[in-house]
């Protein structure tokens, strides 16, 4: 048998959550969406649209894409505001690790106001390499905030790849 529900009175300075405004559902939906984005490190969807740090990089994990061609895999990582000297790419036991540090400072002085913003911190992303990567010939380049890592396939891997025809039934 289920235990009866016990209500505990709220004490102190804590406020109860505001009730959902049934007359303005879109406004409460926007507030909920903004709250979700805040949980991921952003302020609101509008802040990111106007130059704030993107969600994909705000939690210390850069966004990456992995594509495949006949002869290689290519990994690209978006690292806005990072300098090449602050990046380190390592390979150990089949794990590729991208590690770096971001230091960004912005100051604006104008009549009547002074704005100073700083963003800094370290990031780390580790990925297990696909089978058949020629680890001796991995190459990395960095340009315009995008790190590209080319992971060439071994000759054996290139030979074993084949396309399988899908038949409609």
Image (cartoon, helix red, strand yellow):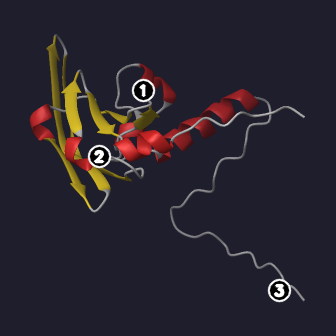
Residue 78 figure quarter: top left
Q: Nearer the viewer, mark 2 or mark 3?
A: 2
Residue that extends furthest to the left in the rendered view of this protein: 85
Name the secondary structure under disc 3: loop
Q: From the top left corner, tell me how far across and down residue 163 is, in percent.
A: 61, 35
**Circle on res. 134:** 2
Q: CA distance from mark 2 to mark 3?
A: 61 Å
Residue positioned 21% across, 36% down in the render: 139
In depth, the one of 18 and 144 nearer the eye is: 144
Crowdedness near tag 1: few (<14), some (14–19) or many (≥20) residues, C-alpha within 10 Å: some
Image side of residue 146 versus residue 104, left or right = right
Q: Is residue 105 above or below residue 96?
A: above
Name the secondary structure under disc 2: loop
Q: From the top left corner, tell me how far across and down residue 145 is, in percent.
A: 25, 26
Quarter of the image with the C terminus in it: top right
Residue positioned 28% across, 31% down in the render: 148
Q: CA distance from mark 3 to mark 1?
A: 46 Å
Name the secondary structure under disc 1: helix
Residue 51 figure quarter: top left
**Circle on res. 48:** 1
To which residue does mark 3 refer? 3
Can residue 5 be seen at all in this image of the molecule?
yes
Q: Nearer the viewer, mark 1 or mark 2?
A: 2
Residue positioned 76% across, 79% down in the render: 6
Can residue 123 be seen at all in this image of the molecule?
no
In depth, the one of 156 and 28 nearer the eye is: 156
Q: CA distance from mark 1 to mark 2?
A: 39 Å
Crowdedness near tag 2: few (<14), some (14–19) or many (≥20) residues, C-alpha within 10 Å: some
Q: Earlier in the sequence, mark 1 or mark 2?
A: 1
Quarter of the image with the N terminus in it: bottom right
């Amino acid at each position: 048998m289920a235990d009866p529900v016990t209500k505990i009175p709220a004490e102190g300075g804590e406020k109860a959550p505001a009730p959902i405004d049934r007359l303005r559902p879109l406004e409460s939906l926007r507030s909920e969406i903004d709250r979700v984005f805040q949980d991921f490190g952003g302020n609101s969807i509008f802040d990111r649209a106007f130059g704030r740090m993107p969600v994909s990089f705000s939690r210390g994990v850069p966004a990456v894409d992995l594509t495949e061609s006949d002869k290689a895999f290519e990994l690209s990582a978006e690292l806005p505001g990072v300098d090449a000297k602050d990046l380190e790419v390592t390979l150990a036991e089949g794990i590729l690790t991208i590690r770096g540090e971001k230091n960004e400072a912005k100051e604006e002085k104008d009549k009547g106001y002074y704005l100073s913003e700083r963003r800094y911190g370290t990031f780390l992303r580790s990925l297990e390499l696909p089978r058949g990567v020629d680890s001796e010939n991995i190459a990395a380049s960095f340009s315009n905030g995008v790190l590209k890592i080319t992971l060439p396939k071994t000759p054996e891997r290139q030979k074993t790849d084949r396309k399988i025809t899908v038949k409609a039934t």
